[in-house]
Image (tube, helix red, strand yellow):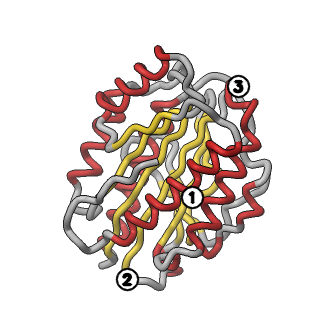
Amino acid sequence: MPILNDAGLKHQTLPTGHYGYSATRLDDLGAAEYTLVTIVCDVSPSVASFVDEMEAALREIVKACRFSPRADNLMVRLVTFSGTMYEVHGFKLLERCNPDDYKKVLRIGSATALYDAAENAISAHADYGKQLTNADLAVNGIVFVITDGEDNMSGLGVGEVRKALTGAVQTEALEGLTSVLIGVNVTDTRIGAYLQDFKTEAGFTHYLELAGADSATLAGLADFVSRSITLQSRHLGSGGPVPSLTF
């Protein structure tokens, strides 16, 4: 697996003590405002049949964001989870994200620690956002949690995910936070209902359900994610709610 963190990223602890995260050092930032982006990918065994398509989608997201007029104002973090969560790289300036580095980064594991990964992603946004705000930078964020199944391994529950989301949305450190739960390859209505319930109980902004996971479907997902990132970043400083996109 490529090592995608570098010397410009500093490890941070979280008040909750759950794993922590890495982020670009404040001294290395040159813009006055940033949109934080976290992509959380399920790498449990059921994802194995379409892991190459998922990696291709990640590469397309990075490529598309580079053409955004807000490219200089984006920082991206990638997290994966199976039985445990793993930070592939922390909040990294988009200009330092090489699309080719996202080959062979999704390593299939066992089990599904969905809640742990979601809570960490959200808490990291709030914590790093506070640091940026304290440095007189404007900041908002968007989180994508991509999964195809149920949690069966987390030490945390839905309540902790909701607490993290509520705190992140209410904090003055972030101008706004959009959270998107994405169900991929959801062909079982029971799984669809489970994920819809998770969206509601945790308080995610949106839930997107995809019945397939072929190259065309995941290319469409990459387009949706990149457009959502650009929209979130353009909305920084507006003070109003971010319009939702359709897939």
State which mark lies toward you, 1 or 3: 3
- Kind of residue at badge 2: Ala
- Report helix, strand or loop for mark 3: helix
The image position of residue 84, as x and y in percent, is 60, 32
The amino acid beneath tag 3 is Pro
Left of 187 or right of it: where is 215?
Answer: right
Q: In this view of the protein, which residue sits in the foreground, 22 or 109?
A: 109
Circle 1 residue: 90
Q: Secondary structure at mark 2?
A: loop
Q: Position of residue 81 (x, y in %)?
A: 60, 36
Residue 139 coordinates in the image, percent (x, y): 34, 69
Q: CA distance from mark 1 to mark 3?
A: 24 Å
Residue at screen point 65% across, 35% down = 213
Q: Give the residue displayed 56% in from the left and 56% down from the top.
A: 223
Q: Quadrant of residue 218?
A: top right
Q: Which mark is residue 45?
A: 3
Q: Residue at x 38, y 27 (%)?
A: 196
Q: Secondary structure at mark 1?
A: strand
- Looking at the picture, which amino acid does disc 1 mark? Gly
Badge nearest the viewer, 3 or 2: 3
Q: Residues within 10 Å of mark 3 (few under 14, many from 20)?
A: some
Depicted 165 relative to depicted 228: above or below: above
User: Which residue occupies the foreground of this view, 33 or 144?
Assistant: 144
Label 3 to label 2, Cα distance in Å? 42 Å
x then y, percent, for residue 54 = 68, 44
Q: Which residue is mark 2?
A: 32
